[in-house]
């Protein structure tokens, strides 16, 4: 689905990411751990193609195609969808209109999706205007449900979301990734797993989202480099007990050697 | 001296009086008289391009969902037709003949005849205009439509409009002003006096569409009495070389409310000096002046003035501008003036460009850069107007949806 080759990214004159190599296969969900300011959001923004993030070197392949130089909308049309942490307010554009824009030509029952995300009363409000943290996340997921991306990029989907709503956010993510137990999909798990193609890359600090969204692989980013990969639960536990310093030891030793 | 003589004397003395704002117009450059006499006619019989222009400013040839229709071309009333008994519609000159007592009571009360040379000119020889009256307690269910049209090259059109909404009555008006697509130059002077009496409500939507070198001087005064409500929307999305106006609303009765919105776009070559003034002279009055302006190369001067002179008067002024072309200018001048210790006046003004992150946000949802920009611009221009009748809201939506930035550039 996605392959990053020696990707280095700068914001302005400052290099943020160094030689990132990452492959996400069809149907896989990856998690990205790492301390604040280490470049996780930069990686997601660069995959989407936001102009703030300048590519210094390396390649981004999506579904086998080199998309490194494609503009944002071309990437969206090829099947990449993103939820950034603080999306801007768009005055005068209703959530309903925005969701219809996301659907593009695809069939999407906006009213039904809104009901699922408890956003029926928000459909006629301007996008993100006066929304709480949790409302923003739910509205983003509503849009992404209509957009139906093949690769879903999520930047801290649980931040600012209260406990009551985090299950709802999890359900929304699972809906898009065709994971979890959705009433609409009664097929047996094994069959669903075999058939699913949707992939995801989820940034999480706390790991809360993993209680709702099962992930396959985790990575740790530290100072702009990917330093370790492994089982998400195991790595989360290790970070919780030992801290990030422990997790990057091998990388540090490698560098010394 | 009778009122008529008094008005004429004042106007005569002000014929050379320059306006406070805007370029001075040399009337001698233009044609005063209309050539020839037209037969009053069904608008359906007008040339197609004229009908299309009229429709684009909200005037429908098929008037089945309009309470009444008034159409004036140059100096001549072409249509004056009432479908709903609840209201009365005449040309202003006819009304003056029919109701001398109303002339005494209303003519030149909300607007001074000697305000400037434009009001003075209109007072000395108004070429028609409409008189609209809704009797006490009557609620007109669908909008009245009016159209002021210039079809003759280089003509000065000056009209005097009187709108009276009697106590407890309600009325919606869609008023369009336009020039024939072939007319390049001309002058339109429109004096409008609006009286909203106790517990009455008026929603007024004005859409302008002018020829390349037409100068426009609307002069509007509105008096709102106790618990009256005045909703006004001004929309001008096409190039307009020279528009200057500063409509003034006087809230003179307790609890009177005014919401005044302007939505304007200035392409290169446009010069818009649009203002608005709300004067609160009674307790618990409320006013809101909201402007959304876009320059795609033209000049916009956006004035706003709130004056609170009575206790518990409360008002808000908003001037938001988007500058989409470095050649353009948007100059916002919000003014707040309190003359009582418990007036509450506030303002918000912001002029800038479209935030790139907003454009990329929409691009990440699949829109091209151009589509994203147009979507943001349409959203910016959309003002949610509380209490606006559906038909008027639909008309505004239609106008905004038809607006394309590329056409405006």
Image (spheres, coloured by chain):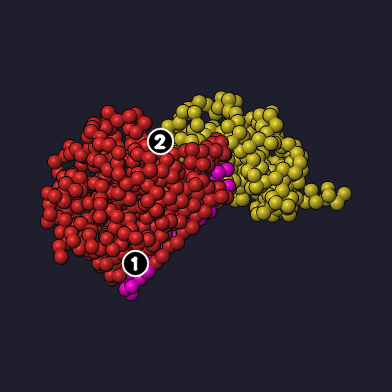
Q: Is residue B258 magenta?
A: no
Q: Are the two marked residues, 2 and 1, in contact with CB atoms closer than 8 angstroms?
A: no
* Residue at x 78%, y 51% (from the top left corner): A249
Cα separation, mark 2 vs mark 1, equals: 42 Å
A36 versus A21 height, above or below: below
Q: Nearer the viewer, residue A151 or B234?
A: B234
Is residue B69 toward the left or the right of residue A107 in the image?
left
The colour with which the image depicts chain A is yellow
User: Which residue does the numbered mark 1 point to in the structure image?
Assistant: B307
Question: What residue lies at 49% left-to-right and 58% top-to-bottom?
Answer: B331
Q: Which residues are magenta?
A: B337-360
Q: Nearer the viewer, residue A227 or B171?
A: B171
Q: Is residue B357 magenta?
A: yes
Q: Position of residue B367 (x, y in %)?
A: 54, 36
Q: Which residue is mark 2?
A: B182
In the displayed image of the protein, which residue is found farthest to the bottom?
B341
B355 lies above or below B339 = above
The mark nearer the N terminus, 2 or 1, is 2
């Amino acid at each position: 689905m996605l392959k990053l080759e020696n990707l280095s990214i700068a914001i302005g004159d400052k290099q943020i990411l160094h030689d990132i190599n990452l492959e996400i296969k069809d149907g896989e969900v990856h998690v990205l751990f790492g301390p604040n300011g280490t470049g996780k959001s930069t990686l997601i923004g660069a995959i989407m193609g936001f102009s703030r993030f300048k590519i210094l070197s390396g390649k981004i392949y999506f579904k086998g195609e080199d998309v490194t130089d494609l503009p944002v909308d071309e990437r969206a049309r090829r099947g990449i969808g993103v939820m950034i942490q603080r999306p801007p307010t768009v005055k005068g554009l209703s959530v309903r209109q925005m969701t219809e824009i996301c659907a593009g030509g695809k069939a999407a029952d906006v009213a039904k999706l809104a009901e699922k995300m408890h956003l029926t009363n928000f459909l006629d409000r301007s996008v993100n205007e006066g929304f709480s943290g949790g409302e923003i996340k739910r509205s983003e997921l509503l849009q992404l449900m209509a957009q139906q991306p093949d690769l879903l990029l999520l930047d801290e989907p649980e931040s600012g979301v209260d406990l009551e709503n985090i299950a709802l956010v999890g359900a929304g993510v699972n809906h898009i990734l065709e994971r979890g137990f959705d009433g609409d999909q009664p097929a047996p798990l094994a069959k669903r797993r075999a058939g699913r193609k949707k992939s995801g890359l989820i940034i999480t600090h706390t790991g809360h989202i993993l209680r709702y969204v099962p992930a396959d692989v985790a990575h740790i980013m530290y100072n702009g480099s990917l330093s370790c990969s492994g089982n998400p639960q195991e790595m989360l536990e290790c970070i919780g007990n030992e801290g990030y310093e422990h997790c990057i030891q091998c990388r540090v030793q490698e560098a010394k050697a | 001296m009778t009122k008529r003589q008094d008005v004429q004397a004042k106007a005569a003395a002000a014929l050379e009086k320059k306006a406070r704002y805007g370029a001075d117009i040399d009337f001698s450059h233009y044609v005063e008289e209309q050539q020839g006499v037209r037969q009053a006619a069904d608008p359906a019989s007008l040339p197609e391009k004229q009908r299309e222009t009229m429709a684009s400013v909200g005037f429908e040839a098929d008037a089945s969902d309009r309470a009444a229709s008034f159409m004036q071309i140059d100096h001549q009333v072409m249509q004056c037709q009432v479908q709903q008994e609840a209201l009365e519609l005449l040309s202003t000159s006819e009304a003056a003949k029919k109701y001398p007592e109303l002339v005494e009571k209303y003519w030149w009360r909300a607007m001074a005849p000697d305000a400037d040379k434009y009001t003075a000119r209109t007072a000395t020889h108004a070429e028609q205009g409409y008189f609209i009256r809704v009797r006490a307690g009557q609620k007109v269910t669908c909008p009245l439509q009016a159209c002021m049209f210039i079809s003759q090259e280089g003509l000065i059109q000056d009209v005097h409009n009187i709108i009276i909404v009697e106590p407890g009555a309600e009325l919606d008006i869609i008023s369009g002003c336009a020039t024939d697509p072939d007319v390049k130059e001309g002058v339109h002077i429109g004096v409008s006096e609006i009286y909203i009496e106790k517990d009455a409500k008026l929603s007024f939507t004005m859409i302008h569409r002018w020829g390349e070198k037409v100068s426009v001087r609307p002069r509007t005064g509105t008096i709102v009495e106790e618990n009256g409500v005045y909703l006004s929307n001004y929309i001008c999305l096409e190039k307009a070389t020279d528009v200057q106006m500063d409509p003034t609303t006087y809230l003179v009765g307790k609890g009177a409310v005014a919401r005044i919105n302007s939505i304007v776009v200035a392409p290169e070559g446009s010069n818009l000096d649009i203002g608005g003034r709300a004067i609160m002279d009674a307790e618990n009055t409320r006013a809101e002046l909201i402007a959304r302006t876009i320059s795609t190369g033209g000049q916009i001067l956006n004035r706003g003035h709130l004056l609170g002179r009575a206790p518990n008067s409360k008002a808000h002024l908003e001037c938001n501008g988007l500058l989409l072309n470095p050649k353009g200018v948007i100059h916002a001048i919000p003014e707040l003036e309190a003359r009582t210790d418990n007036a509450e006046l506030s303002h918000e003004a912001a002029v800038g460009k479209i935030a790139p992150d907003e454009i990329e946000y929409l691009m990440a949802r699949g829109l091209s850069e151009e589509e994203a920009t147009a979507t943001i611009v349409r959203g910016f221009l959309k003002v949610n107007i509380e209490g606006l009748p559906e038909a008027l809201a639909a008309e505004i939506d239609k106008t905004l949806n038809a607006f394309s930035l590329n056409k405006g550039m």
